[in-house]
Image: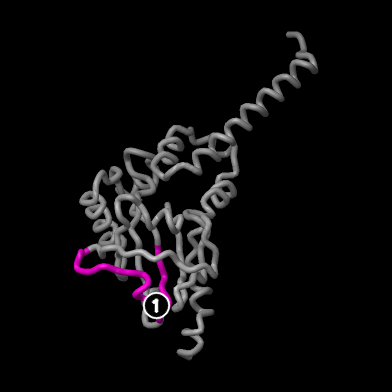
Amino acid sequence: MRKPSKRTLSTVAVFLLLVWGGFLLMIGWAMRQPPEKFGRVMSHVPGPAFLLFPFETMWTQTRAGTMEPGDAAPDFRLPTLDHKSEVELSALRGKPVVLVFGSYT
Amino acid sequence: MYEQFGGQVQFYAVYILEAHPTDVWQMESNVKDKVLFASPKNEEEREYVAGACVRKLGIKFPAVIDGFDNTTEKAYTGWPDRLYLIGSDGKVLYKSKPGPFGFKPEQLEAAIKKLPEMRAGK
């Protein structure tokens, strides 16, 4: 078999780099979408592909949010699970509050 | 942590949209643990899954449910999970990095221990 020329090799390398760059842009775009859409996109990404990008770094950046320590915490008024009462953040002043955001899955 | 600091700090779980429902982005670990829920389609379904979550995970502190429009989640960038400590003046003292990587209870604990309320209690 003939050895591939330097030119062919560099064309292949540039092509792969472009594909990878496009892939990174796609992941970055997905991370900025609402959670459901992001989840739908990611469910189509095959397992090994997760090794091809710095998930944690990109995720931490795209999901940083705009709120910083020192800012006033946005108020909310939400029902408790048993619907017996509502919790209003601003009504909890006077004592520190821990908020644990999460879901089951 | 709730048992240790519950006297000085108010703990609330904020139930938000599911991270890995069966119909969106299924996780192998959830299949193994049989934590299989489709994405709640309305308020009632969300309440049902939230209730299962609180019971099965044995969450002892009060839980509130974010509305189906996810307003609170959006304001706090809370998905998929995140920790906050808010001071008695209503200002954010500690904001974890986004979960799952950034969900670090030990950082929250360190922030709680720095509260003026904790020093006064000693």
Q: Where does the magenta region start and end?
A: A82-100
**Is A66 in front, or is A56?**
A66
**Is B50 in front, or is A71?**
A71
Image-based side of A20 in relation to A77, left or right? right
Q: Position of residue B98 (x, y in %)?
A: 50, 55
Query: Which residue is the site of mark 1?
Result: A93
Q: Which quadrant of the view contains residue A76?
A: bottom left
Q: Chain of mark 1?
A: A
Q: Position of residue B108 (x, y in %)?
A: 49, 69
Q: Residue at 51% across / 51% down in the picture?
A: A63
**Is A12 in front, or is B62?**
B62
Image-based side of A38 in relation to A49, left or right? left
Tag 1 secondary structure: loop
Instruction: Please identify the quadrant where the N terminus of chain B is shown.
Output: bottom left
Type of residue at label 1? Answer: Arg
Q: Residue at 29% across / 57% down in the picture?
A: B53
Q: Residue at 24% across / 58% down in the picture?
A: B51
User: Looking at this rendering, what residue extends furthest in the top direction?
Assistant: A1
Q: Position of residue B20 (x, y in %)?
A: 37, 45
Q: Residue at 76% across / 9% down in the picture?
A: A2
Check residue B76 for magenta coloring. Answer: no
Q: Position of residue B21 (x, y in %)?
A: 33, 44
Q: Which quadrant of the view contains residue A3?
A: top right
